[in-house]
Image: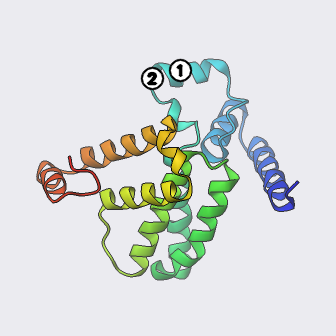
Amino acid sequence: PNALYARMLDLKDAMRLSIQRVLPAPESALLNGILIGDDNELPSYIQQAFRNTGTSHIVAISGYNVSIVIGAVALILGRIVGRRRVAPITVPLIIFYMVFVGGSASVVRAGIMAIIALAGAAMWRRGFTLNTLGLSAWIILLGEPNLLFDVGFQLSVAATWGLILYSMGTNQRVNACTWGSFLNC
């Protein structure tokens, strides 16, 4: 019923067909899965291989996919318009992409984290990723408090939190937990 959303679906179909014209069969299905979350044409043996190796999240639309798309767009735009001007252009694109791929909890969380990071970078602020995660979770729950009980949301936040702590050095991890980031480790 919404004309804008109908246009988005038309764009999604055009993108899918365009990728299929450019790439051969299994590769095009993989790219469609990574970019727009459409893994319907991915052969079952490839889907099983992803499950066997524990990498099926690569094809399912999640924060990983959002970070790939946003990172690529921000990098390209940064070279064209400059790093400080990327945020005002990229933020609407992030919001569009979140709606375009379906707006799951992990996609929205990753999109909001990216928006916060871009806003900080535009103001020459260095971010602390745990705080960014906490703020994004708070914003999401402010808009939809029942997501607190959604397993997808819980796993997205918990997995991101774990990855952030894992990527920090031991001293940073201890300091982050001692000084009470959004979670008191």
Whole-percent x, y for residue 172 in the image: 16, 55
Please tell me which residue lies in front, 185 or 46: 185
Q: Quadrant of residue 26?
A: top right
Q: Quadrant of the N terminus?
A: bottom right
Above or below, 108 against 23 in this view is: below
Residue topped by disc 2: 53
x 51%, y 38%: residue = 150
- Type of amino acid under label 2: Thr
Describe the element under mark 1 as helix, strand or loop: helix
- Could you give the CA–CA distance between mark 2 and mark 1, rounded to whole angstroms? 6 Å
Q: Residues within 10 Å of mark 1 (few under 14, many from 20)?
A: few
Q: Residues within 10 Å of mark 2 (few under 14, many from 20)?
A: few
Above or below, 71 against 16 in this view is: below
What colouring method underlies this structural image? rainbow
Q: Residue furthest front?
A: 145
47 left or right of 171 in image: right
Residue topped by disc 1: 49
